[in-house]
Image (spheres, grey):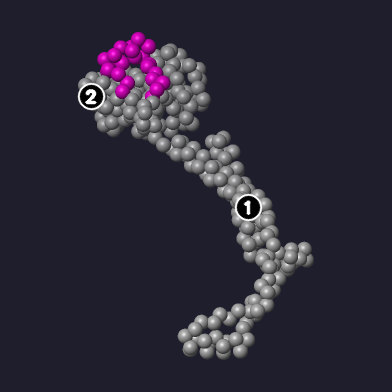
Amino acid sequence: MSVLLIVIPLLVVLAGVLLFAAFRRRETGEAVGLLSRETRRKDADASPAPSSSDAAPTGREVERAAAAGRAGTAVAVVDETEAAPPAPFVPPDPEALGVTRRQFLNRSIVAFFGLGLAAFGASALAFIWPKLGGGFGSKITVGNVSDLLAEIRANNGFLYKAEGRMWLTEYPSSALSKAQSVYAPPVLASMEEGITVVYQKCPHLGCRVPECETSQWFECPCHGSQYNQAGEKKAGPAPRGMDRFATAVSGGRLTVDTGLVIQGPPIGTNTTGQEAEGPHCIGG
């Protein structure tokens, strides 16, 4: 966002300079006025002196040429006066050779304007382009279900996976009948294997929600929202339970699509019946 705040004003300034330069060029090209006295004198000195050879032939010369044409002979009509000497060589203005200063400045402005637009377009594409090479926003193969359950138990009921910004907890098989009436099939895929996968963000204002080892709940440090191990809301200002990711289990391996976030369960959902098992970490 800070890059956009710098780039956008710069592009506006460059666009204004470009439009001003184009307007000045058109105004200069359409300008009509009087030549200065010095310019007229230079033009007079550089112009060749008028020659009598450029004068039209007389009537007698035309008649004589016509008569010679009828007789089959060609007579050239030549002026008997001496031809004028050639005009003296005048070297061209050095500024007229190659690129003028005005042309250089105009082209530089256009080049910088195009470069700025290209940089802005590249940054915008990089911001909105999906990450297809793994990590958050893509499908992540978390691991074997049996190994993940062992890790969850070894970490006192909570397992955090930073690459997917997700929490994994153990879901009791006895609560599956209630879960099937609440959760969508992509969410149930992991729960049926005994694992709940929830997004780390609090649905209230987006704070990262940590676990509380004493209460065995998720408890948000920002505004005190509390959720059981299944991510179902128990207290606080959050509008719903913690959001979920779409999951799939194939060959005993759990895959989580972190690019597909599914809204958490509504307030009042408590499929596991889990209550706080000790003191709360947030809000006493």
Label 2: how many residues lie within 10 Å, few (<14), some (14-19) or many (20+)? few
Give the farthest residue toward the right.
37
Numbered label attached to residue 251: none
Residue at point 52%, 89% (across, down): 67
Residue at point 41%, 37% (across, down): 129
Q: Is residue 49 visible?
A: yes
Q: Indicate which label's residue lies in the foreground, 1 or 2.
A: 1
Residue at image mark 1: 97
Q: Position of residue 144 (x, y in %)?
A: 27, 17
Q: Helix or strand or loop: what does disc 1 sit on? A: loop
Q: Position of residue 242 (x, y in %)?
A: 39, 28
Q: Earlier in the sequence, mark 1 or mark 2?
A: 1
Residue 146 painted magenta: yes
- Which range of residues does the magenta coloring cover? 141-164
Residue 105 or residue 270, whichever sits in front: 105
- Image mark count: 2
Residue 159 painted magenta: yes
Residue contact between numbered discs 1 and 2, judged by CB atoms under 8 Å: no
Residue 93 or residue 146, whichever sits in front: 93
Residue at image mark 2: 250
What is the quadrant of the N terminus in the image?
A: top right
When the figure is inspected, residue 18 is found, relative to residue 282, above or below; the finding is below
Residue 157 sits in quarter: top left
Residue 65 sits in quarter: bottom right
Q: Is residue 232 visible?
A: no
Q: CA distance from mark 1 to mark 2?
A: 74 Å
Q: Kindly identify the amino acid type of the residue bearing the numbered disc 2.
A: Ser
**Left or right, residue 28 beside residue 171:** right
Q: Kindly identify the amino acid type of the residue bearing the numbered disc 1.
A: Leu
Residue at point 47%, 39% (across, down): 122
